[in-house]
Image (cartoon, helix red, strand yellow):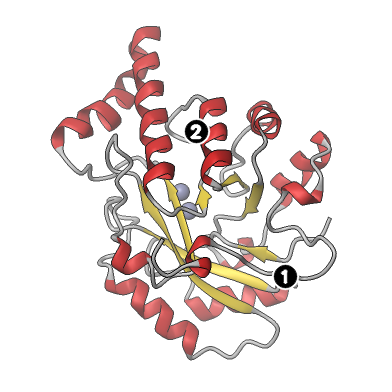
Amino acid sequence: MQYYGDYHTHSRYSDGQESVKRIADAARQRGLAEVAVTDHGPNVVVSGVKNLDCYYRVLEEIHGLEIPGVRVLAGAEANIIDLEGKLDIPPAVYEQLDVLICGLHPYSIPANIRDGYRLFGRNHLRHLGPGWRQKAVEANTRATVAALENNPVDILSHPGLFFEVDIEEVSRACVRENVLFEINCGHHHPELEDVKIAFKAGVTFIISSDAHFYDTVGELEYGRSLVEKLGIPAERIANCRVGGDKGWTGKRKQSKHW
Ligand SMILES: [Zn+2]
Ligand SMILES: [Zn+2]
């Protein structure tokens, strides 16, 4: 199978090591037709963008780029910051972008103290016993499903990483809301068993590098080997080339006002 794009990378504007131009160069080197720069939302401590203006700066930089053969897209990886699925990037900003990813991340500043405890606090306490763990899984699943229902998200990043979720329920929400289920090669996540569950539930996958360095842009080997092992067809993988170059078709592309 041939992969034509990588839609999850981080530049220096968040916790990546490279400039936007270097990410584009790396994508060209890998033979990709498209790459998206998707920096972390501001609410994740240390690794997030300093402020929302960073997304506009990425857009400007992309505008000035001339990298033959590679289309560079602007995006964001927003943090889910409460149980109702609120994101830390407002519509006024993400509507300007091509790709909206969301996910749960440790060290995120919650929308309010109550949900901070119910979501992030409980997650810390999950090791205390099965009851605690169950409560954490319920909260993580609820927040994730709500984020997909309440925002025009294109990709759910690394489902269940750091925050265990009911993978079947989350997969069903991805199908319902037309959100791509990510296989994240940077974190080698999810594991085969969870990918199997998601496949059975009917999701469309996307395989991403989650690159923070030049060398890992377009590094999709973990996902490639998983889908081959499970016999997942190219039609079920959004960034696989299936009979010609279809290119990125995200929700932000389809409509300005979702
Ligand atoms: Zn992430
Ligand atoms: Zn990421």
Q: Secondary structure at mark 1?
A: helix
Q: Residues within 10 Å of mark 1 (few under 14, many from 20)?
A: some
Q: Is mark 1 within 8 Å of ligand 2?
A: no
Distance between the alpha carbons at the discs numbered 1 and 2: 29 Å
Residue 94 x/y as whole percent? 37, 65
Q: Residue at x 28, y 44 (%)?
A: 108
Q: Secondary structure at mark 2?
A: loop
8, 46: nearer the viewer: 8
Q: Residues within 10 Å of mark 2 (few under 14, many from 20)?
A: many
Which quadrant: the N terminus?
bottom right
Residue 81 x/y as whole percent? 28, 43
Choose top left, top right, bottom left or bottom right for residue 134. top left
Please give the residue where the numbered disc 2 appears in the rendered image.
160
* Placement of 56 over or under 157, stated as above or below: below
Choose top left, top right, bottom left or bottom right for residue 27. bottom right
Is residue 143 found left or right of 9 in the rendered image? Answer: left
Is residue 79 found left or right of 21 in the rendered image? Answer: left
- The kind of residue tagged 1 is Arg
* Placement of 148 over or under 37, stated as above or below: above
Residue 118 x/y as whole percent? 24, 26
* Placement of 89 over or under 159, stated as above or below: below
Please give the residue where the numbered disc 1 appears in the rendered image.
30
Q: Residue at x 43, y 50 (%)?
A: 102
Residue 175 x/y as whole percent? 58, 40
Looking at the image, the residue that sits furthest to the left is 113
- The kind of residue tagged 2 is Gly
178, 72: nearer the viewer: 178
131, 219: nearer the viewer: 131
* Mark 1 vs mark 2: in front: 2
Q: Residue at x 39, y 73 (%)?
A: 96
> Upstream in the sequence, badge 1 or badge 2?
1
Q: Residue at x 42, y 29 (%)?
A: 141
